[in-house]
Image: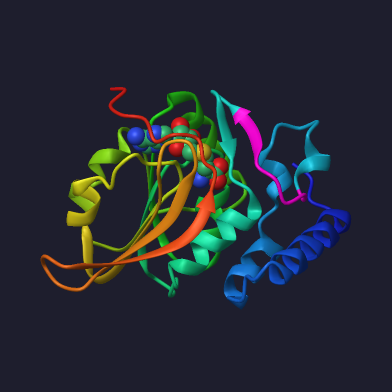
Amino acid sequence: MRDTSKHQGLRNQLANQLKEKGITDERVLEAVRKVPRHLFLNSGFEDFAYQDKAFPIGAGQTISQPYTVAFQSQLLEVQKDHKILEIGTGSGYQTAILCVMGAKVYSVERQNELFKQTSILLPKLNIRPKHLSFGDGYKGLPNHAPFDSIIVTAGAPIIPQALMAQLKIGGRLVIPLGEKHQIMTMLIRKNATQFEKHEFGEFRFVPLLENKN
Ligand code: SAH
């Protein structure tokens, strides 16, 4: 578990690249400068950690591309102490970015292997989400709802109704929608029944899979 000044330098460069690509939220860029992404990849792949690319993390899944993580985090307009639900913990990198931004993060992962691995990794890095759970993200976490915002980090064929129901009024749901490619979509909850929809172009994710347990 080594984090050196070389890694710090690479992170600064990555944050600069993300800025050039249009990420303007300084709190997001600051979190990118802080979270040691190389420790979220298997050792041996360190050299890839600070390239702006997705990368395999086991169980057929990927750690999202830094630009995608930054883009979704920016859409959430994270405030300190916001209660955020993440669907698809995966490597925990996105979870860590939101924690470092001061959010109270609740995250759900359906691959047991990744759930276990990430539950061990995050505390070692002194990153403490409020709650990590193993289960089906389509259902959200009704016992912990409502949330200030919800982020889905896998490509969803539909918007899960349960997630819409677990959002506070004024809250944001950021979800990549579609099968082969996804359109980054944000729903803002206006009141009990109305949601305002915004779309932000194409991204690529591994699929949000249904009911494994
Ligand atoms: N945020 C992660 C992205 C991982 S890829 C990161 O930064 O590394 C998407 C993750 O979503 C995978 O780990 C996959 O197992 C998980 N996933 C897919 N379908 C799911 C579901 N229905 N519920 C919870 N997690 C799911």
Q: Which residues are magenta?
A: 50-57
Q: Is residue 207 left or right of residue 121?
A: left
Q: Quadrant of residue 24?
A: bottom right
- Residues 186 and 144: in front is 186
Say whether residue 52 is magenta: yes
| Chief SS of the magenta region | loop
Residue at coordinates 28% horizontally, 22% vertically from top-left? 213
Residue at coordinates 49% horizontally, 53% vertically from top-left? 128
Is residue 99 among the parts visible in the rendering? no
Residue at coordinates 60% horizontally, 44% vertically from top-left? 124
Please identify the quadrant where the N terminus is shown.
Answer: top right
Residue most toward the right? 6
Relative image position of residue 106 (x, y in whole percent): 37, 51
Is residue 72 depicted above or below 58 in this figure? below
Which corner quadrant of the figure contains ligand 1?
A: top left
Relative image position of residue 68 (x, y in whole percent): 58, 54
Question: How is the protein colored in the picture?
Answer: rainbow
Is residue 195 among the parts visible in the rendering? yes
Say whether residue 41 is magenta: no
- Residues 196 and 108: in front is 196
Relative image position of residue 2 (x, y in whole percent): 79, 45
Q: Quadrant of residue 35?
A: bottom right
Relative image position of residue 72 (x, y in whole percent): 50, 60
- Residues 164 and 46: in front is 164
Is residue 128 depicted above or below 138 in this figure? below
Residue at coordinates 55% horizontally, 24% vertically from top-left? 60
Q: Quadrant of residue 194?
A: bottom left
Q: How many marks?
A: 0
